[in-house]
Amino acid sequence: MKRMVVIAGAIVVGCMFAGVAGCVVGSSRGATEASAAEDLPILWEKSGTYSRLTRPVRVVVRDPATLARLPITEVPIDFETQMALVCGLGVTPGNELGVRITRVWRQGTKIRVQERRIHPGLDHASGLDPASPWTIVIVPKSDQNVEGYVARVPKGVFGEHLGAR
């Protein structure tokens, strides 16, 4: 019994050492990656509650033709120096839900986007009021891939539904 306690203690100490060593290695690599990140300024943004989006969509817009396929709102953009990021949730059961793009940054060979979902919380009054929330931001133009975003508007993304106003 005493030998099992000694072995168990050695295992616990070994696991703690491995965990600390793993944290040190992981945090130094994370610090290097974080320092390589370059924030891209959000030059313009607009969000809304109602659109004709029937499903979730994330599109990077680098030309007028792509923007014309996303008739959500007027977007003041100079395609020579800027691009737009469009994020829509599709049909939602309530009009208190939403989405915002809060940060855009370049990390290595990719551009990453941080989105924030907006929801009413527990104090929310029950009932259905379908909506289709969206957000659009303009950032400096880049030819790099935007993680999680596509360059073409998916087919069938627009339609008439209860959340379209």
Image (cartoon, rainbow, N blue to C red):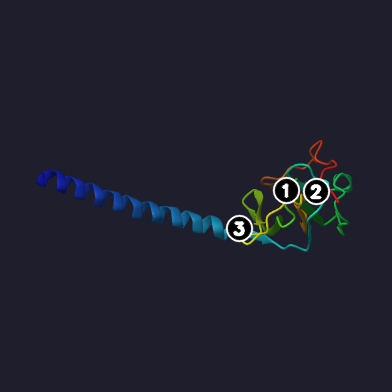
Residue at disc 2, secondary structure: loop
Mark sitting on residue 92: 1
Along the line of sight, the residue nearer the viewer: 149 or 129: 129
Mark 3 or mark 1, which is nearer the start of the sequence? Answer: 3
Residue at disc 3, secondary structure: loop
Q: Quadrant of residue 33?
A: bottom right
Question: What residue is shown with label 2?
Answer: 163
Question: Do callouts 1 and 2 mark residues in contact (Cβ within 8 Å)?
Answer: yes
| Residue found at x 60% / y 59% | 122
Of circles 3 and 2, which is in front? Answer: 2
Q: Is residue 105 visible?
A: no
Q: Amino acid at mark 1?
A: Thr
**Residue 41 in the image: above or below residue 163:** below
Residue at disc 1, secondary structure: loop
Q: Is residue 114 left or right of residue 51?
A: left
| Residue found at x 81% / y 46% | 162
Which part of the image, by quadrant, shows the N terminus? top left
